């Protein structure tokens, strides 16, 4: 590693030059210095969430420092390409969160619930999807990308461009463009936060540990998610064939999982194009089931949109109610993959697919299931299959198995993305990373990781053997990742976006 380079709050900032290129004099381990041109006039420090500081062409950069193509740039997509990515993202990103209706209610309740309890839990689910997924991730955290790459560690890399928090290896293949703001471009409170982090070895080490630990949690999800999703779908056989043994269910699940990992070398684009119709059909089918149940059972569950119902449920059940939140948490499992998979698609594509299709379908699904459970509370054990309209049971199970296979793809793709990032930053040994697309730079396949995930998933399925036990371990991983994402995004808002604390 190159020695740390200390920066004063003056009028210059560091820019990494390409090793062996003619772009300026290469000093300090590949760091050259250039003046920055601010897009803010002195004294005008309005924070911007969507437009970060970028030097203007023809500004006061010194000649020979910046050239087109010197630095990795974020890809932008419009028109047909954007909608194609939005379509593919449904097949890759939302399979995980889209199959959560298979086991959320069964993981939340341990016995047939009362009508008020059903409405209370539904309220928790609705507001989790709105606040946790839509507001926090889709509208805020997705903006914390590092030139189009997502995930907790990518957020750490973004911070390292705006603050001196890491030592950089001069042998890094990608170029790193430092964009550290001058003292007069930051409010005093924001500047104090940056100085505290830059001057403290403990803070620097803590940020690094958080980034690496978050990646490890996502990779753990890569083992648990396929097992949880596919096993939850195959368990529908217990409804169709009550006499089937648990060993047969586990064996079928393992066979499907092995097939899933065999097709990974085809790449994200091809897999997403094939998988997208499955998730579109699955979510549409669940939404149709929800509408059917609302029409035929208890439409009064719409009162769950009142957040007071969620608080009433927690107050009514006390400690037991708080414990049941572990099941509600499963309603937004996959949100961590949504951020990590950002590099394979784009923020705008993810926003279009989530708001335009996935969120409405999921809301109708959970509301419809609640309408049925309010009348038939004993059906909570297999909510999707028990609430299916007459004659649709077999169809729902077949589509559920296909959707569960797709669900696993979200976290597998996220694992490939994150591991490639930490390899690039020298936090993991060099391994083979295959780029599977000539058009989209960040669509990757990592053979070694694929094999390890396959082995781990099959072993986990054979050991746990049911979704209830798996759900507890699964929820812990999701909880840690979302917590670390929150911490990194908070620092990004202070140091990069310059929001005042």
Image (spheres, rainbow, N blue to C red):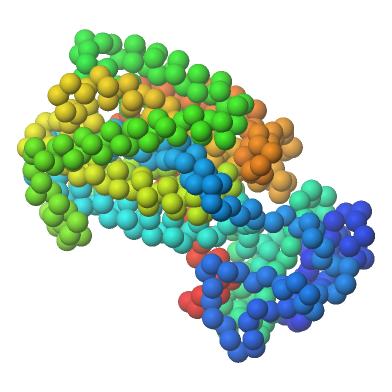
Any part of residue 66 in sight: yes
Q: Position of residue 355 (x, y in %)?
A: 37, 52
Residue at left offset 75%, top offset 72%: 57
On screen, 199 above or below 83? below
Q: Nearer the viewer, residue 475 or 415?
A: 415
Any part of residue 450 in sight: no
**Left or right side of 347 for 129:** left
Q: Position of residue 159 (x, y in %)?
A: 62, 63
Q: Nearer the viewer, residue 287 or 46?
A: 287
> Which of the 4 quarters of the picture holds residue 41?
bottom right
**Left or right side of 476 for 237:** left
On screen, 131 above or below 361? below
Residue at left offset 26%, top offset 11%: 244
Q: Nearer the viewer, residue 16 or 362?
A: 362
> Which of the 4 quarters of the picture holds residue 288?
top left
Residue at left offset 50%, top offset 39%: 88
Residue at left offset 48%, top offset 76%: 501
**Left or right side of 70 for 340:** left
> Which of the 4 quarters of the picture holds residue 199?
bottom right
Query: In this figure, what is the number of numbered marks?
Result: 0
Q: Position of residue 200 (x, y in %)?
A: 64, 68
Q: Position of residue 204 (x, y in %)?
A: 64, 62
Q: Residue furthest front?
A: 80
Q: Residue furthest bottom?
A: 43
Q: Nearer the viewer, residue 193 or 358?
A: 358
On screen, 416 above or below 237? below
């Amino acid at each position: 590693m190159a020695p740390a380079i200390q920066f004063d709050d003056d009028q210059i900032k560091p820019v990494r030059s390409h090793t062996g290129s003619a772009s300026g004099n290469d000093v300090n381990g590949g760091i050259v210095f250039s003046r920055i041109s601010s897009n803010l006039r002195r004294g005008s420090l309005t924070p911007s969430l969507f437009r970060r500081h970028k030097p203007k062409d023809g500004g006061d950069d010194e000649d020979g420092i910046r050239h087109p193509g010197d630095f990795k740039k974020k890809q932008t997509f419009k028109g047909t390409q954007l909608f194609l990515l939005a379509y593919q993202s449904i097949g890759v990103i939302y399979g995980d969160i889209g199959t959560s209706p298979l086991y959320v209610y069964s993981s939340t309740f341990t016995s047939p619930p009362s009508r008020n309890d059903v409405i209370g839990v539904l309220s928790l689910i609705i507001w989790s999807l709105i606040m946790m997924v839509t507001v926090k991730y889709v509208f805020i955290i997705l903006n914390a990308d590092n030139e189009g790459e997502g995930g907790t560690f990518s957020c750490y890399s973004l911070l390292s461009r705006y603050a001196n928090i890491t030592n950089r290896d001069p042998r890094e293949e990608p170029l790193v463009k430092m964009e550290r703001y001058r003292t007069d471009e930051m409010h005093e409170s924001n500047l104090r936060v940056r100085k505290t982090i830059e001057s403290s070895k403990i803070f620097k080490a803590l940020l690094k540990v958080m980034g690496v630990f978050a990646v490890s949690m996502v990779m753990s999800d890569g083992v648990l998610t396929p097992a949880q999703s596919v096993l939850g779908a195959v368990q529908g056989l217990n409804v169709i064939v009550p006499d089937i043994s648990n060993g047969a269910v586990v064996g079928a699940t393992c066979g499907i999982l092995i097939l899933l990992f065999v097709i990974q070398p085809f790449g994200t684009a091809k897999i997403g194009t094939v998988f997208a119709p499955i998730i579109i059909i699955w979510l549409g089918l669940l939404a149709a089931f929800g509408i059917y149940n609302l029409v035929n059972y208890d439409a009064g569950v719409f009162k769950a949109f009142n957040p007071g119902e969620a608080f009433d449920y927690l107050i009514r059940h006390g400690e037991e109610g708080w414990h049941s939140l572990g099941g509600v948490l499963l309603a937004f499992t996959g949100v961590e993959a949504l951020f990590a998979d950002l590099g394979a698609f784009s923020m705008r594509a993810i926003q279009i697919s989530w708001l335009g299709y996935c969120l409405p379908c999921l809301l109708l699904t959970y509301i419809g299931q609640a309408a049925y459970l309010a009348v038939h509370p004993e059906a909570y054990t297999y909510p999707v299959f028990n609430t299916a309209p007459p004659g649709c049971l077999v169809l729902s199970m077949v589509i559920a198995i296909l959707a569960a296979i797709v669900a696993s793809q979200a976290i597998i793709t996220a694992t490939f993305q994150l591991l490639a990032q930490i390899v690039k930053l020298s936090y993991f040994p060099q391994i083979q990373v295959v780029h599977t697309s000539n058009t989209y730079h960040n669509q990757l396949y990592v053979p070694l990781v694929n094999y390890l995930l396959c082995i781990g998933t099959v072993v986990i399925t054979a050991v746990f053997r049911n979704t209830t036990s798996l759900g507890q371990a699964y929820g812990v991983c999701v909880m840690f990742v979302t917590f670390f994402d929150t911490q990194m995004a908070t620092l990004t808002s202070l140091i990069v976006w310059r929001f005042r604390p």
